[in-house]
Amino acid sequence: MMAYSVCHFGNDLCASMWFVYLNYYLLYVVGLTPAMTSWALLSGQIADGLMTPTVGLLSDYCKCTWLGRRNTWYYAGTALVVPSFLCTFLTPDLADGWCRNLWYVTFPAIFNIGWASVQISTMAIVNELTFD
């Protein structure tokens, strides 16, 4: 149980940064318009909404790796979350407005694909800790 809680602490820490600070960051630090900020947040939520049931289904039925059903998705999700989280909170010097907008719509979507993989695989492990 201790390993699960340590693992889930990072998950919750990342979520608090994402849901509390991202909107403010995109509006006031990056300088996106309110409409573009909404699109950036919406792209992430759409990706999350599509990937959450997909990862849940695939992690239940796919037994194709030596890492196990859940760990495979956890590691793959982490490999997406770390760089996309960093790229979301970087302010690249993109002169063109459309390049900057594309940057901030793409990386929240990639982050939420990885987020769904980490979140679902972590939560599913709890049910497998006991046979009761």
Image: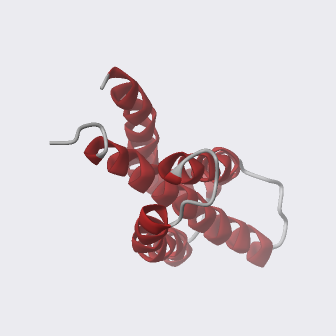
Q: Quadrant of residue 103?
A: bottom right
Say above or below: 94 vs 72.
below
Looking at the image, what colour scheme do you see? secondary structure
Q: x, y percentage for residue 96? A: 83, 72
Q: x, y percentage for residue 94? A: 83, 62
Say above or below: 89 vs 97.
above
In the displayed structure image, the side of residue 70 where residue 95 appears, left or right: right
Q: Residue at x 83, y 55 (%)?
A: 93
Say above or below: 53 vs 24.
below
Q: x, y percentage for residue 49? A: 41, 74
Give the residue at the far top of this rendering.
2
Q: Quadrant of residue 109?
A: bottom right
Picture quarter with the C terminus: top left
Q: x, y percentage for residue 113? A: 55, 64
Instruction: Report the number of numbered marks.
Output: 0
Q: Is residue 8 visible?
A: yes
In the displayed structure image, the side of residue 60 where residue 72 appears, left or right: right
Give the residue at the far left of this rendering.
132
Q: Residue at x 71, y 74 (%)?
A: 102
In the displayed structure image, the side of residue 9 where residue 72 appears, left or right: right
Q: Residue at x 59, y 50 (%)?
A: 72
Q: Is residue 89 visible?
A: no
Picture quarter with the N terminus: top left
